[in-house]
Image (spheres, coloured by chain):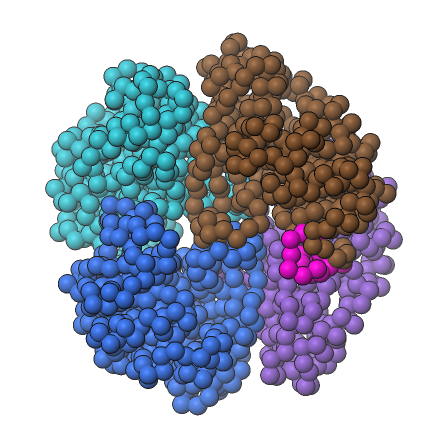
Chain colours: A cyan, B purple, C brown, D blue
């Protein structure tokens, strides 16, 4: 049994990692920590775990590095890069769910407003999108788990971009996210009555996930890609739906597009392409690790609609998928 | 035109007072204040008011007392009693939406955990439930606007208690509230994902509105009443539905009960009693100042279901109703 | 007092028309009808009106045409065009909230799947978007009230298109609507658990509001416009937010764009343009007749975000605004 | 592998049975049926199953009885009793999620408005509440799976009633349910905008689950019990919270009550009793098969708050728990 620790166990992503791992046959959760006032059993902090997991959730501590084989860091950005090095030094596998290891140091500083604190380990970080990078992931010691928006958006664009059927320029992603995407934090803009019966665009083309998307799409295209990205906050707990508009450079119909995407994701267990004429909805992916994609060609535009559960494929589920690949477990273990 | 100020203008109750007053023909809003970082037009702080009200919302200031004829205090409890005296000294009318003037000093200290800071004015405060106390309200200088739960619960019990058809003992109110009842404040328990798709009882029989309910019902009954009160938080913005269970001391049927309630509220413009066999729902009172009550007799129990909009009849609407009575305006002005 | 009738009084738009008219000083609601099993007071069918409006809601009847001065038709499309002629013949004003008089007969047949039943009156119909067509509206006898999506989208594009700062081609509107937009009808896809905690795109670039948008934008541009339009269903009751992407043909910055839009809507009481850097949200327009628009220029793209309450500016509110203009009342009467 | 069929596969309970069984190691889903227009793979009807379960969902058919070892009937009441006999005759195990086998024939006729169609099998039916009747369940051929409300309410009352610490008379259950409880059916009262931002009591003390609750509690108490039961519809998808008020006949404090309940449910894997002073919330049981119960003694009243997921412990989860017991599988298999 792999001994696993979760740092940030009381956040939404940390809670979800625990839920998934409780059904994983090759793993034992042995250590938990979080920024809390008092060390208590996790089942007191999160009563959903009563009777299922009663180990104590500790305050952040360096001793954990010597006690586990692998750690999930479910921390806000800027905090992860101060904690990851201890685990790496101790030779442990690190799966970081924050943004800290997803960008180069300069881009990170520009978008996250602080200089990077662990430049030494940055080049070792592998971007954990298994549908694109499974070979690198197999060998990763430090895994940068993708952001929630980037996961759904990149999966929705990559086949068309790699297949060279669309222009690199002018790609638009109009994305809509449920509120767990903002994390479990006390913020006046996130309280129930400010989100419920409301809808808003935010950080219009200025969201910090934009450089991450651009970085991976540029790598994929072999040339600079700079998308237009508008995130919106929707009154629901979970799920991201991205409606993506791409300019075709070839004459295609919808069935051709479906064929290209199906071929691209052939053998990938967590991407499902809808039949021509059908589109996915959040309800069909919530609670699963799937990314569902629907496609439509209209004149010279390819529209792709991608849906994920932001806490599963967009965070904890993908993190476990990455662990499965890194550790040689079955890729789908605990995820179906 | 009556010059009116609103203190706590950016809270949910303050915002609602403003919305109502903008349609009031006898009133001009001339002063606003709130605990804010920077003084700005209210339409910048609350964009819903753009083009409708653009006066500056100031930080709390004593000068307001000399500039208005009447002030609404939409403040957390404990703060109101520090601000009300200045207005009263200046001879201005005060309508306090907090709990600070609803109880005697000892009960206040016991339930709110602090000694009362304005004992001198406490005896002058009139409890602003117009369906019971309109004569006192007409003469009030300091008005204690009822709590949201007490409003719906007292209106649901008073006719039966005064009519002596129920026992004073063992009255149960099982109440369900929308989330604006908790105010606009950053609290981890109030963020969207903790309230949405969730339901919980809280402060079971220990809510601070219990002594307020008991005080008024005891006054009404002429003897001690001590109810059992369980509030619940429901994933909706507005509304309180209280399901009240009372032991009958007389043999009644549902039609008799409807008759008793209708007679009691005859001429009261904001209470509507459902026909026998019908029950109210939140949807029918949201956005209105009505309290709707449905009744059913079953064996020896009288069940009353009362519905209000917690920000209207449960707070701002009732406050304006009280102002109308205090100032000799039409009782329903701006409220229909 | 203008005698007004509402046909389709129990639908969401009809209910909203009644709510607004109850506060209108120049109007009396004298007739109501709807497709119902039994004729009852409207306050029995919709208890929110208890004590406010108790006239009987009748089954659809031709006698109404002789009893009112003006009628609002809150009916599904295909039904309006069978009822409107009787009112027009009787010399009464007709405000139709359905799609029946918004398109030419051929386009109507193509998108609504049936031939038009009142081709004679079609040319007399005036498209009721007051910010563009107030002169025609003043003289209208038959008013085609705009669709909910078209209202927000056209208002978000018109200034840029008329100002010739954008290309006519490739305009994209990614629109998100609350569920009242689908009407009050029993449909398995609209039940609570299918909409709540869900989000979906539907009728991708095939929605019947598309030809309406194209028709008006083409008229405005003086040349064919064919937008890409993706509607989405969001788990909230009210509101439409459209995120619109337009290709600039001139070098502009965000402040220039704000200036162009503000100039265009100068003197229009129901359009509010956000300051540069700010965007509207549904919460700020719900319950109002405003259309709020936020703008951002990014490289060669102009992004406009427009918000309306689909039942107010998107239906009943705009219908009353049109009535006010047609009848010489104050444009904002009952709407502020 | 046990061959299992699900009748009513596209209802909320049927869908949930399938979800659970997909993770069950001893079971294979081999047959599905539902009232549908066209026979299609279940993954077309419910896309959440794409890639996980692709067998065809048939129209209701008698052949299924010969092809499976056990069948779950996820049907409306009145339909189950017409289908169950064929499976029983073929010697197959039947787990019925409807109300058809929960009452005696007379009570059934009185509350469900139709005479019972399968009186022959009625005496064989075992009431499937494992915490009370596991011995009978082990031997059951025809299992009547409890209603959603009865499950949470009976579990919340049984220990106090059996322990003889409360009066049999005057027990009140004020219950609040999410909307999946009403099933997946097109009904104007269930559409999103009628449920969202709304709350209502319904069938006040007249709900058809009342005789079921009374029957089991009477059996448990050895004397007639007749509770007062008020169900409410809450704007959330899943979960039932029941707040239960019971008159104490003994002097107890809250810790005593917790002790009594813990002792009663000792060894029962799916009931969790909160520590004194704590209460459960829906969030902590949604997605699980747990019933969480919180307790408080106040003067002479015992308040119990019980929470379940209405589709898990209140329907599909309990049905699988019953199958596990009937078939000798581990009681918690596929449910943790």
Identify the residue shown where x is 46% and y is 49%: C189
Q: Is residue A225 left or right of residue C199?
A: left
Check the image and report above or below for B130 versus C217: below
Identify the residue shown where x is 33% and y is 34%: A276
Is residue D331 at all visible to an observer of this figure? no
Residue furthest out toward the bottom: D223
Is residue C123 at all visible to an observer of this figure? yes
Total labels: the figure holds 0
Identify the residue shown where x is 20% and y is 34%: A266
Query: In the rendered structure, which segment of residues is drawn in magenta?
Result: C33-52
Q: Is residue C71 left or right of residue D214?
A: right
Task: Identify the image quadrant of residue A294.
Answer: top left
Residue C121 % position (x, y): 70, 31
Task: Identify the image quadrant of residue A105.
Answer: top left
Residue C306 % position (x, y): 57, 29
**Residue B66 within the magenta-colored segment of the rendering:** no
Identify the residue shown where x is 58% and y is 12%: C164
> Which sits in the foreground, B222 or B298?
B298
Residue D315 % position (x, y): 36, 66
> Which sits in the foreground, C64 or A173?
C64
> Which sits in the foreground, A330 or C227?
C227
Q: Is residue D272 left or right of residue D88?
A: right
Residue D121 % position (x, y): 31, 81
């Amino acid at each position: 049994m792999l001994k696993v620790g979760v740092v940030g166990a009381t956040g939404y992503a940390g809670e979800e990692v625990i839920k998934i791992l409780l059904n994983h046959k090759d793993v034992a959760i042995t250590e938990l920590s979080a920024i809390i006032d008092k060390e208590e059993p996790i089942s007191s902090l999160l009563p959903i775990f009563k009777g299922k997991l009663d180990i104590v959730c500790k305050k952040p501590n360096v001793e954990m590095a010597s006690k586990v084989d692998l750690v999930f860091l479910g921390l806000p950005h800027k905090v992860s890069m101060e904690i990851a090095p201890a685990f790496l030094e101790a030779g442990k596998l690190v799966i970081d769910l924050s943004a800290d290891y997803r960008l180069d140091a300069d881009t990170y500083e520009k978008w996250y407003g602080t200089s990077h604190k662990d430049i030494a380990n940055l080049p070792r970080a592998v971007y954990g999108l298994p549908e694109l990078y499974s070979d690198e992931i197999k060998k990763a010691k430090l895994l940068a788990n993708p952001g929630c928006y980037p996961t759904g958006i990149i999966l929705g664009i990559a086949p068309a971009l790699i297949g060279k059927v669309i222009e690199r320029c002018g790609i638009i992603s109009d994305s809509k996210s449920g509120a767990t995407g903002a994390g479990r934090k006390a913020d006046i803009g996130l309280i129930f009555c400010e989100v419920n019966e409301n809808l808003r665009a935010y950080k219009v083309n200025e969201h910090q996930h934009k450089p991450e998307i651009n970085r991976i799409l540029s790598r994929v295209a072999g040339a600079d890609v700079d998308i237009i990205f508008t995130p919106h906050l929707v009154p629901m707990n979970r799920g991201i739906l991205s409606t993506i508009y791409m300019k075709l450079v070839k004459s295609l119909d919808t069935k051709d597009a479906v064929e290209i995407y199906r071929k691209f994701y052939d053998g990938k267990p967590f991407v499902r392409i809808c039949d021509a004429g059908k589109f996915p909805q959040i309800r069909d992916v919530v609670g699963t690790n799937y990314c569902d994609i629907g496609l439509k060609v209209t004149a010279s535009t390819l529209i792709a609609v991608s849906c994920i559960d932001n806490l599963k494929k967009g965070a904890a589920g993908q993190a476990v998928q990455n662990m499965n690949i890194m550790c040689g477990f079955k890729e789908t273990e605990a995820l179906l």
